Amino acid sequence: MKTYLITGAAGFIGANFLKYILKKHEDIKVIVVDSLTYAGNLGTIKEELKDSRVKFEKVDIRNRKEIERIFSENKVDYVVNFAAESHVDRSIENPQIFLETNILGTQNLLDNAKKSWTISKDENGYPVYREGVKYLQVSTDEVYGSLSKDYDEPIDLIIDDEDVKKVVKNRKNLKTYGDKFFTEENPVDPRSPYSASKTGADHIVIAYGETYKLPINITRCSNNYGPYHFPEKLIPLMIKNILEGKKLPVYGKGDNVRDWLYVEDHCKGIDLVLREAKLREIYNIGGLNEEKNINIVKLIIDILKEEITNNDEYRKVLKTDISNINYDLITYVQDRLGHDMRYAINPSKIAKDLSWYPETDFETGIRKTVKWYLENQDWVNEVVSGDYQKYYDRMY
Ligand code: NAD
Ligand code: DAU
């Protein structure tokens, strides 16, 4: 029986991870710690909260007393830290909370994980930590900075490593917009307040791993997409706006490239790293799916129109005329400050060490995602009922 402490599990990836591990492992207990910011929603995990294996704590990861209490009341085996301020645009507006939550919150969790360790001394009298909480920090590819976009139209992506080829057997027609990729060896080079705060957190995690020999891992993933994605991020925002007949704000020329990873593939990767990876290693988790923002937006328009045309039930959620669903909805708006041009992950290390690869091709993943939103409009209405509208009006 293992006990997971999952922070941020009322948010997008954390909630998907909670759902995934409850299905995957019968014999577990889970403590969910979430302060329920604008991005956290209990409705997202309402079924899971009925499960007798799950306990919910509405606690801020920065709260030293409360986090200490939770660790002292439970024998935790794994900590998976998803809790963070996660939106780049909000970090440009107000960096302070990003540094506080993402860096100091992480340190608070680590301090308490460290207390759970049995300490003995080595032959030189230095402390050696044994048997205790294993800590996984969910980080981001944005810590590596920005890659150049070398091609306007994508070229074929050739995987030449035979071991990796064997693992990535089910993915065909892979494409890339550039010659360089993020590997775990890349120096960090964060360029937004968000990514700087995530890099700071990574450094603290690494420091605790090296100094106290705590059993830590860091995963750095690319852009996730899928169910329960908050509609301030590109994909769910575009779906929501299309359904409402609103303009689709594309930053700059729409030619920035992201590497899209289906959230369930990511969750599988995290659980594998937690249970099977060598301690103190960093793993990049990418989608092997690079695409320009403008192409993503056009594809969503096409798929949404097709799904609505073919399904009367879906048509009921449309708040505009179906003939309004076309590329004229796209509007180019002022670019994001310091907008990173391209992210692309080389997932060879996790493929080789843990036989993980991103199983879901984008065409399949984005169609599943669009259909999920069409079938879960109640969820969307619930999560935007807070101060979302004020944020939206400020931004667009
Ligand atoms: P999200 O914004 O959807 O959810 C964040 C969750 O953390 C929410 O439930 C929120 O209530 C909670 N939270 C925020 N501050 C907290 C605090 N101080 N104490 C306790 N809980 C708090 O984020 P997400 O997109 O699910 O991202 C999860 C993690 O993955 C983050 O660490 C993010 O940096 C990282 N990440 C996300 C992506 C992505 O594409 N979404 C990609 C790479 C890395
Ligand atoms: O790469 C991993 C990161 O991906 C995570 O660490 C972040 O938490 C997550 O939010 C995401 O960051 P991005 O900034 O890449 O995601 P976002 O959905 O905000 O934007 C994706 C791209 O789309 C980016 O190039 C900006 C652009 N964009 C975004 C919005 C919200 C638009 O053109 N218009 C928009 O309205």
Image: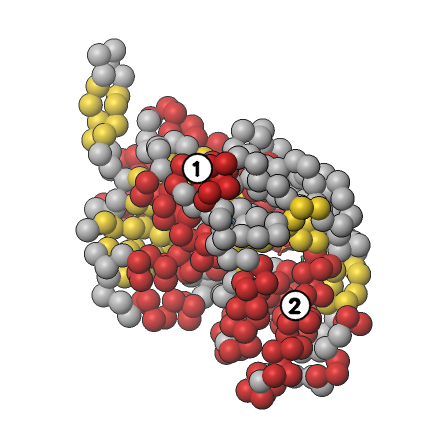
Q: Residues within 10 Å of mark 2 (few under 14, many from 20)?
A: many
| Residue position marked by numbered label 2 in the rendering | 300
Number of numbered markers: 2
In the displayed structure image, the side of residue 52 where residue 7 appears, left or right: right
In the rendered image, residue 95, in percent from the top left (x then y), is placed at 60, 46
Q: Residues within 10 Å of mark 1 (few under 14, many from 20)?
A: some
Residue at (37, 24) in percent of width and height: 211
Residue at (68, 49) in percent of width and height: 257
In the displayed structure image, the side of residue 362 where residue 12 appears, left or right: left
- Please tell me which residue lies in front, 166 or 22: 166
Residue at (48, 32) in percent of width and height: 203
Q: Image height check: is 177 above or below 239?
A: above
Could you say whether the residue bearing mark 2 is in a helix, strand or loop? Answer: helix
Q: Amino acid at mark 1?
A: Lys
Mark on residue 352?
1
| Residue 62 seen in the current view | no
In the rendered image, residue 246, in percent from the top left (x then y), is placed at 72, 74
Residue at (21, 19) in percent of width and height: 121
Could you say whether the residue bearing mark 1 is in a helix, strand or loop? Answer: helix
**Furthest residue in direction top, as rendered:** 124
| Residue 215 seen in the current view | yes
Residue 235 occupies which quadrant of the picture? bottom right
Mark on residue 197?
none
In the rendered image, residue 150, in percent from the top left (x then y), is placed at 75, 40
Between tags 2 and 1, which lies in front?
1
Q: Amino acid at mark 2?
A: Ile
Residue 230 occupies which quadrant of the picture? bottom right
In the rendered image, residue 336, in percent from the top left (x then y), is placed at 73, 51
- Please tell me which residue lies in front, 261 or 109: 261
**Quadrant of the snapshot with the C terminus:** bottom right
Q: Do callouts 2 and 1 mark residues in contact (Cβ within 8 Å)?
A: no
Residue 316 occupies which quadrant of the picture? bottom right
